[in-house]
């Protein structure tokens, strides 16, 4: 069996295909715990996990907290509005202070790319990137991959279409980094203002026309329009975006019959996705959320569950 | 007291000298350059420069000395200590201090401080606009009387094209160059070059056109006015191409680049090391090659440092929040010698870009070696290997992406106005 020897999970970029599959396999063994009556195992008893969130999040933080708790770790949540960040403390000082309290893992979400990397250089604790600006969101990509494999039985050979604001999406980046390690066809679609130049260099195809992009797709990943990132200035209006790129039933009909539709959440219903599609038979959006817990349990286990 | 430097290979691009000669310095002037000088008297300090090269002192047309206002980043004293270690005998300090050097009292203050504490010649560059705000002209005439030798709003572009036109026109009165920082504010909203590396880092980007549109605009305006223009820290292939084209039709264009633009690419930013955050940003391999080509074919006239020292806290933060710039004055010449070792430039060609060309731009009587001339010179060895150690910097700014790099070529001795101001133990 493969041995895990990374201290941190900072991004998908640096992971090998084998490491990714190892995480997914580990997650598989954890998924069942969440369906038990007593949803708790002692694996991480005595370990401390801090979630340090400089950006608002419901899903990711809750998911990490539940994952840690089901493994019996103690969890502490720190969010920007309650922390001394607002009082002007630097990330470095916050990191040093947290380190003094001897946590085993710190999950960080930050609006700026590279913040987890900086943290990892300061602390001995394992650092997990819970999303850093427009850079990476590795646990999202892993749970997406887990869901794809679960639904399709394989990752290789699939056509995956990613639709939306590719430029500003850490979810898109991490998913591109993970999917390109497999034998997949990846097509990115969105307004040209939201597709970075030379995106093809990452091993994907760019297709501005959503109908052409979706043709024969096995997987459709919708991205959230990030209003808080000033996404609006890249498009004339949300209404126009929704008209052109909002995922509707007629689009889905162009994909393969057994297509699955994914969304990292939170959804802007009626903007990037219609109710009909979000709640329709192809949607696996809630499976993604469920799998997120298993994948995060696996990551916590691999990073801090070993011999101490 | 005289200084005799013996057996060195003297390279002086201005006078086409490249041979083994002795050089005798008396007071602040060069008394003699000849073979086997044997002066009489015993008050003579003899320095053996066998295996070394003697060259005119280097001139940096673009440094930030941070004084007044940011003395915790650098002072005129520490900045000039660093400069002479790097081989510089004359440097130009930019106007973005606090208060801004946009009036004669600040200019006078800088000159006074430099006289009192500076180890090399310091020439202040005055602001183009009051407070670098790009709204109204600074008192260029009064600053000129006080001693500025150029004007620049460096750190920012002059956004208002009409104001730039007026500044170019007005500067004609004093016959001083306008040094233009070319950057379109609206296009330059990010932190790194828009290219291959940014696809991976996700950092917000500054496309190369942010520089190029302003390069072209500024050339157009200067040509219309008939004024000279100097474009500083050129970083892109498109800029080099545009400048090469424009120079064919209009002779009053000059430009410079900095060592980091022909040494590093945007790939260096992938580690999120804030010491690689510099404005303009580190560009692509293609841009780097074009910069080298531009240096080779003389489209790029000058190598400047854009020495931008910072305190630790300004850099020890998230990439987006970190201050811009590299503390570069102690590594610039050694990094540039790589161009010689790689065969891009000859030593003579390289030295031109550090001496004759900047002296010509600023109309300084330095940058060359001649009997009766001012004794501003250096002794360096192009082959000595050394390892960059930021903690050994004399600059207060330890912000370098070159820490730990092994470089070949080192300045060993710096003489300003006939006085030894820096001497390496190796000589």
Image: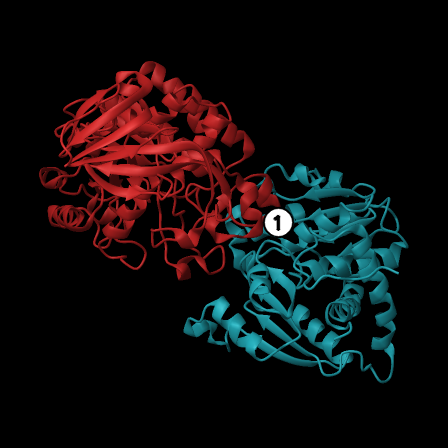
Vertically, is B301 above or below A294? above
Nearer to the camera, A79 or A91: A91
Vertically, is B259 above or below B78? above
- Residue A174 in percent (x, y) is at 69, 53
Q: Residue at x 69, y 76 (%)?
A: A65
B285 left or right of A221 in image: left
Indicate the chain on which mark 1 is placed. Answer: A
- Residue B97 in percent (x, y) is at 25, 51
Nearer to the camera, B91 or B157: B91
* Image quadrant where residue B412 sits: top left
B41 left or right of B327 in image: left
Question: How is the rendered protein coloured?
Answer: by chain
In the rendered image, which quarter contains the C terminus of chain B? top left
Q: Which chain is red?
A: B
* Residue B368 visible in the picture: no
Q: Which residue is mark 1?
A: A165
A24 left or right of B3 in image: right
């Amino acid at each position: 069996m493969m041995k895990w020897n990374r201290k941190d999970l900072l991004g998908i970029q640096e992971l090998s295909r084998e490491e990714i599959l190892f995480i997914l396999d580990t997650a598989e063994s954890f998924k069942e715990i969440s369906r038990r009556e007593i949803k708790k195992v002692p694996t991480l008893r005595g370990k401390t996990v801090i979630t340090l969130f400089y950006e608002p999040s419901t899903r990711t933080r809750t998911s990490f907290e539940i994952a840690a708790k089901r493994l019996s770790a103690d969890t502490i949540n720190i969010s920007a509005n309650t922390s001394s960040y607002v009082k002007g403390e630097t990330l470095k000082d916050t990191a040093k202070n947290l380190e003094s309290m001897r946590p085993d893992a710190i999950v960080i979400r930050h609006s700026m790319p590279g913040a987890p990397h900086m943290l990892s250089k300061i602390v001995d604790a394992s650092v997990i990137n819970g999303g850093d600006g427009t850079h990476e969101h590795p646990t999202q990509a892993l749970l997406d991959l887990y869901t794809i494999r679960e639904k399709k039985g394989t990752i290789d050979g699939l056509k995956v279409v990613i639709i939306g604001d590719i430029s500003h999406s850490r979810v898109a980046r991490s998913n591109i980094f993970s999917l390109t390690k497999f034998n997949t066809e990846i097509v990115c679609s969105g307004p040209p203002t939201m597709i970075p130049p030379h995106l093809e260099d990452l091993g994907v195809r760019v297709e501005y026309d959503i109908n052409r992009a979706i043709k024969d797709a096995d997987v459709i990943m919708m991205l959230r329009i990030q209003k808080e990132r000033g996404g609006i200035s890249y498009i004339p209006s949300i209404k126009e975006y929704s008209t052109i790129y909002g995922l509707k039933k007629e689009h889905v009909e162009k994909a393969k019959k057994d297509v699955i539709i994914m969304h990292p959440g939170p959804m802007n219903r009626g903007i990037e996705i219609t109710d009909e599609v979000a709640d329709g038979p192809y949607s696996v959006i809630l499976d993604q959320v469920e799998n997120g817990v298993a994948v995060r349990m696996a990551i916590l286990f691999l990073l801090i569950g070993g011999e101490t | 007291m005289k200084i005799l430097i013996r057996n060195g290979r003297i390279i002086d691009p201005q006078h086409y000298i490249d041979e083994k000669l002795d050089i005798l310095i008396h007071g602040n002037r060069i008394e003699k350059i000849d073979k086997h000088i044997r002066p009489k008297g015993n008050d003579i300090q003899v320095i053996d420069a066998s295996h070394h090269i003697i060259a005119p002192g280097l001139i940096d047309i673009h440094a930030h000395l941070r004084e007044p206002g940011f003395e915790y980043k650098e002072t005129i004293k520490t900045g000039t200590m660093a400069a002479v270690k790097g081989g510089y005998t004359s440097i130009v300090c930019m106007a973005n201090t606090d208060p801004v050097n946009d009036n004669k009292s600040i200019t006078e203050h800088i000159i006074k401080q430099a006289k009192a504490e500076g180890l090399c010649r310091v020439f202040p560059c005055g602001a183009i606009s009051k407070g670098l705000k790009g709204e109204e002209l600074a008192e260029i005439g009064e600053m000129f009387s006080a001693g500025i030798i150029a004007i620049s709003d460096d750190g920012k572009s002059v956004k208002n094209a009409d104001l730039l036109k007026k500044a170019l026109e007005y500067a004609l009165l004093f016959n001083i160059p306008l040094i233009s920082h070319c950057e379109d504010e609206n296009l330059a909203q990010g932190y790194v070059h828009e290219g291959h590396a940014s696809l991976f880092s996700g950092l917000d980007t500054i496309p190369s056109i942010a520089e190029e549109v302003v390069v072209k605009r500024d050339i157009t305006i200067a040509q219309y006015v008939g004024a000279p223009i100097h474009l500083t820290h050129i970083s892109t292939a498109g800029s080099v191409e545009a400048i090469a084209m424009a120079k064919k039709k209009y002779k009053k264009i000059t430009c410079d680049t900095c060592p980091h633009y022909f040494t590093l690419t945007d790939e260096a930013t992938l580690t999120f090391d804030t010491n690689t955050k510099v404005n303009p940003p580190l560009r692509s391999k293609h841009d780097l090659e074009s910069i080298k080509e531009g240096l080779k074919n003389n489209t790029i006239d000058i190598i400047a440092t854009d020495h931008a020292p910072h305190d630790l806290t300004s850099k020890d933060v998230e990439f987006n929040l970190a201050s811009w710039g590299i503390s570069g004055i102690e590594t610039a010449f050694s990094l540039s010698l790589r161009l010689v070792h790689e065969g891009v430039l000859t030593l003579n060609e390289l030295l031109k870009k550090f001496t004759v060309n900047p002296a010509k731009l600023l109309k300084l009587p330095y940058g060359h070696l001649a009997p009766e001339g001012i004794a501003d010179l250096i002794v360096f060895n192009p082959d000595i290997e050394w390892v960059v150690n930021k903690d050994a910097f004399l600059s207060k700014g330890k912000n370098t992406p070159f820490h730990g790099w092994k470089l070949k070529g080192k300045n060993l001795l710096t003489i300003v106005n006939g006085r030894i101001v820096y001497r390496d133990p190796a000589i």
